[in-house]
Amino acid sequence: MTDMIERPAREPALRLEGIVKTFPGVRALDGVDFEVMPGEVHALLGENGAGKSTLMKVLAGMYQPDGGTIVIAGREVRMATPLEAKRQGIVLIHQELSLVPEMSAAENIYLGELPRKSFGRVDWKTLYARSDAILERLRCSFRGDATVAHLSIANQQMVEIARALTVDARVVVFDEPTASLTDAEKVVLFDIINDLKAQGVGIVYISHRMDEIFTLSDRITVLRDGQYRGTLDTAATNEDEVTRLMIGRSLDLSRDTTPARLGDTVLEVRDLTCAPHFEDVAFSVRAGEVVGFYGLVGAGRTAIAEALFGLRSCESGMIRVAGKEVTIDSPEQAIALGISLVPENRKEQGLVLQMSCRDNMTLPQVQDLTAGPFVSSGAEIAIFDQYRDRLAIKTPSWRQPVGVLSGGNQQKIVIGKWLSMQPRVLIVDEPTRGIDVGSKSEIHGLLRELAAQGYAVIVISSEMPEVLRVSDRIVAMYHGRITREFSADEVTEDALVQAISGIGVELVS
């Protein structure tokens, strides 16, 4: 293993020493050390639940530590509130959006610090001029007067990032900033990070995407189970070493080359059109097969999944399930036909975060579990126990609110919810978004295992390594059209990139 790095002689922009944070029954942080130098991008890694976000919320004044010290520019400080942290030059760009939807982008960017005129009136002209300048720097396609609720998730993330550019920041924390950004927006973000770095700002970068970590960071610090595990020089380490430090073991990320045992065609789609999202789409999925859909954001992949689940109406085309032509106008019809959808945004579309693990697991079939006017608690617990064991879901009890679980375990709850409905076709949209490398490997193995058990599986992913690893066939999409289909044996990265870019290929019809 690469030798751990000794602390540089010059003064860090930020130093956390022996930070302890305890919640009821959980020691989230156990004496954690961390520092970031001026002009450095320092990556903070760990599995979901390792303590990364908790540590940053302590830094940002959202949580008060139970022990340890925070030192900024050589002076010990106490972050009693988020406003105090901001005054100290600490800016946290949240993983979960913390915007006010009913307000404009400009109001959100300068929330709490709106420019004022006499008698406390808001100086709207100055507000919009300043916010427009920042949004132009971020190359955004909208202006400061746009209502946040009307913006896409990606553009809302850009508003969150814009907040960091309004203050004279000493340290900026980016917590999973690219989860909802397009490739073009990621380029802009990386340029902004490099600009801040050149200005001497310390950057803390939290991400599960190893390619981003090795592209951006100077050093990597790893947490595991709330404890500090070490700091590595990015240029002197590799993904395997970082993974071992994160999860205590190496991962085999190669594709399972065992030939798939394919059954009959379960789902067949012909000439399906849902303007303006996709047009003349045709493909099929067999029992025991994983078909991956790959393309750029906006290519139409999620819209196809939503159409198959009855969330979108199609103008033309044909859908067959188990050889029978069907009409799907609602999720109820899709479920009755044996089609289930694990959506791309599990927290907003797949879970009720305040409800228990058990209640989330049984939500689609609660009417079938009633005994008179009451839901059968015993039947619900039996279903939860079955899929908790089958999917290796880590939770102390079925009573646990699903919102406190790690991302990987939340995703397993959503998958278990739909598996309990005994589907023929399981559609999984962005199966590992926001999930650590260890849980990602488990989800990939689970998808392959489900196919081996006879499920027809559709995987939609924006990550090329993922779609290459889990798929028996890959469907490439560009601007709402299927451009090519590849078998796992014939696909290459170059051919796949060309297909999703519309370069030199005939559209499949």
Image (cartoon, rainbow, N blue to C red):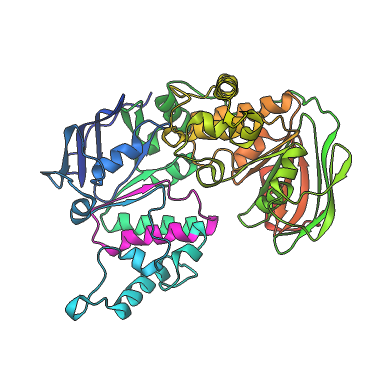
Q: Nearer the viewer, residue 168 or 352?
A: 352
Q: Is residue 393 rendered to the left or right of residue 459?
A: left
Residue 330 in view in this figure: yes
The x and y percentages for residue 399 are 45, 27
The x and y percentages for residue 418 are 64, 34
Q: Residue furthest front?
A: 372
Residue at image point 24% right, 43% down: 59
Q: Is residue 446 rendered to the left or right of residue 89?
A: right
Is residue 476 depicted above or below 250 in this figure? below
Please check the rendered image and state whether residue 491 is part of the magenta-colored stretch, yes or no.
no
Is residue 314 depicted above or below 179 in this figure? below
The x and y percentages for residue 489 are 76, 34
Residue 36 in view in this figure: no
Q: Quadrant of the C terminus?
A: bottom right
Q: Is residue 254 rendered to the left or right of residue 436?
A: right
Q: Quadrant of the N terminus?
A: top left
Please check the rendered image and state whether residue 163 is part of the magenta-colored stretch, yes or no.
yes
Residue at image point 41% right, 48% down: 96
Q: Nearer the viewer, residue 255 or 339?
A: 339
Number of numbered discs visible in the structure rendering = 0
Q: Quadrant of residue 375?
A: top right
Q: Nearer the viewer, residue 206 or 245?
A: 206
Q: Residue furthest left?
A: 75
The x and y percentages for residue 481 are 75, 57
Which stretch appears magenta? 155-184
